[in-house]
Amino acid sequence: MIHPAAIAMYLLDTVSQAPVVVQIPPQTPDPSWKWVVQSVVPIIGGTVIAVWSFIQNRESEQKQWQRNQAAAHDQWVLDQKKIEWREILKATSSIERTIPAVSKLQDRYDSVSKYVPEMISELLAARGSCVFIADDLVSRL
């Protein structure tokens, strides 16, 4: 039987007899173009991406601002139309309140002939000051 120490001595003796030579190839310096590519190109690329993002963001904000302005203008026009219709309806309702529901024709004529002409002139004045609903008024008359 072979003793383990003898086996170990045989292996160590074999290893120590064979010299190991490690050869390292000489280092060649990196070319300058490689340095430029590795350092400058990422910086330029990042800058281009950042500028492009800023431009896109600015255009998006400009479009959103224009949409908001258009919506605000449309709402303003609707509010103006509402005010004008309110004035027209107020003048019309004052005429309707003046005309009484009486049974005698003479009483009705006296009431109408006394108050309605000035109310009609108020209605016409209100109609004449309408800018936003003028087209609606002309088409309905």
Image (cartoon, helix red, strand yellow):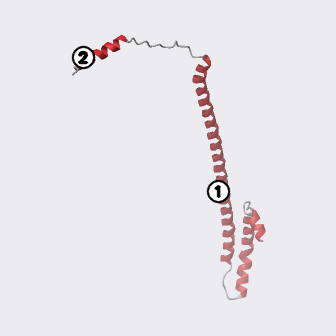
Asked which quadrant contains residue 101, the reply is bottom right
- Asked if disc 2 and disc 1 are in contact, CB closer than 8 Å, the reply is no
> Which mark is on residue 65?
none
For residue 35, above or below residue 81: above
Asked which quadrant contains residue 7, the reply is top left
Label 1, on which residue? 75
Question: In terms of secondary structure, where does tag 1 sit?
Answer: helix
Would you say 121 lies left or right of 51 here? right
> Which mark is on residue 6?
2
Would you say 2 lies left or right of 64 here? left
Q: Write the residue at 71% across / 75% down.
A: 115
Earlier sequence position, callout 2 versus callout 1:
2
Residue 108 spot, x, y in % from top left: 71, 83
Per the model, the C-alpha gap separating discs 2 and 1 is: 102 Å
Q: Nearer the viewer, residue 60 or 45?
A: 45
Amino acid type, label 1: Gln
Q: Residue furthest bottom?
A: 104
